[in-house]
Amino acid sequence: MLSSRSHRLPGLFTLLLLTSFASAQTDTPERRDRSRLKLDKQNDRLIISSQTATGEWIELAIYQMAPGTRPYLHPVKDASGSVTLTEDRPADHPWQHGIFTGFHRVNGLNYWKEDEGKQRFVRLLETQTNANQVSWTALIELVTPDGKAVLEEENRIVIHAPEPSGAYLIDFDLLLRAKQEDVNFGKFFVGGLSVRMPWDKENPRQTHLNSEGIRGRAAEQKRASWCTVERPFDKEVFGIAILDHPSNPGYPSAWRVDEQGLINPNISGLSDWTLPAKTERRFRYRILIYRGATTTEHMAGRFNAFEKTR
């Protein structure tokens, strides 16, 4: 006579077999390919790549991090890897670098134009990679002309796998930490996280849209939860949006929106402010890289999703 335990074994074996079959059905090569990212460190660069359904690796973005210089993301490409959506060191504003941070009037010095105080990359604090995202944290210092570091900046950047729609997300956390002395930020029309798109002076075609439904240069210095910049590249439109998280100090920001294709949720656009010695202040942003002209309704949905994140 068989024991009750031996009666259960065939059922257990069948269950395990079915589970393995189901896993094999869902974990197809196509499913894995759609979500795979990798992060390669080459000299003074981090190269972020995505794998297509055919197994090909395409470059999405490069993080430039030469020691002693301002770090930034460029080129930043569309999800297919075929169109470069950012511009580095344009002739009209050579201190602008794709997706970057910069500050005016820090203890009276101009760090934005890189002609007085300097932002300098120090080192990577960490890197992480999984199937759906890659991330890293970089330490930067703001240094006076005489070489004194007055402020630390930590950038935590997370790039998410491209979506079927041809969009992808970049989460950007900006942490500012005062060192031994108070750091004063003077009111100015630009400062903080910025995105610069290419600009054709002879045929300017970029457009802007913010959360209040304001378009173009009319959005300059207007407070908003998000703002976009987009333009045609050959026959197709691409855009980049920045979303300003409601937890940020001074939310919603007063935005810099210029005719060359820059957008910036300005952290010093409303008033002077001070970061006391040995304290820190965090700003959270989400950057959306997308294909096609967006709408206020679509962006409102994106913002609602970002607002719920911790």
Image (cartoon, helix red, strand yellow):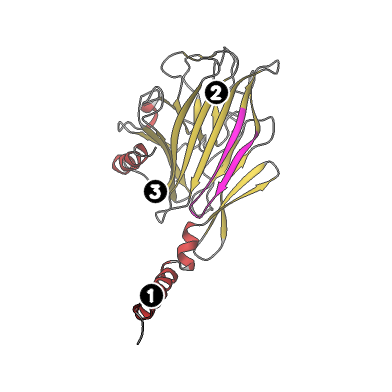
Compare residues 45 and 279 and report the one nearer the observer: 279
Image x and y of residue 94, in percent = 61, 29
Distance between the Cα atoms at labels 3 and 2?
A: 38 Å
Q: Residue at horizontal 35%, vertical 28%?
A: 224
The residue tagged with tag 1: helix, strand or loop?
helix
In this view, which residue lies farthest toward the front? 1
Q: Main secondary structure of the magenta part?
A: strand
In this view, which residue lies farthest toward the bottom? 1
Give the image quarter of residue 286. Answer: top left
Image x and y of residue 126, in percent = 60, 40
The residue tagged with tag 2: helix, strand or loop?
strand
Choose mark 3 or mark 2, whichever is in front.
2
Give the labeled residue for mark 2.
Answer: 177
Range of residues picked out in magenta: 123-140
Q: Residue at horizontal 55%, vertical 37%?
A: 98
Q: Amino acid at mark 3?
A: Gly
Which badge, 1 or 2, is on the more N-terminal residue?
1
Give the labeled residue for mark 1.
Answer: 12
Which badge, 3 or 1, is on the more N-terminal residue?
1
Which badge, 3 or 2, is on the more N-terminal residue?
2
Compared with 162, 302 (above or below) is above
Compared with 79, 299 (above or below) is above
Tell whether label 2 touches label 3 (CB within 8 Å): no
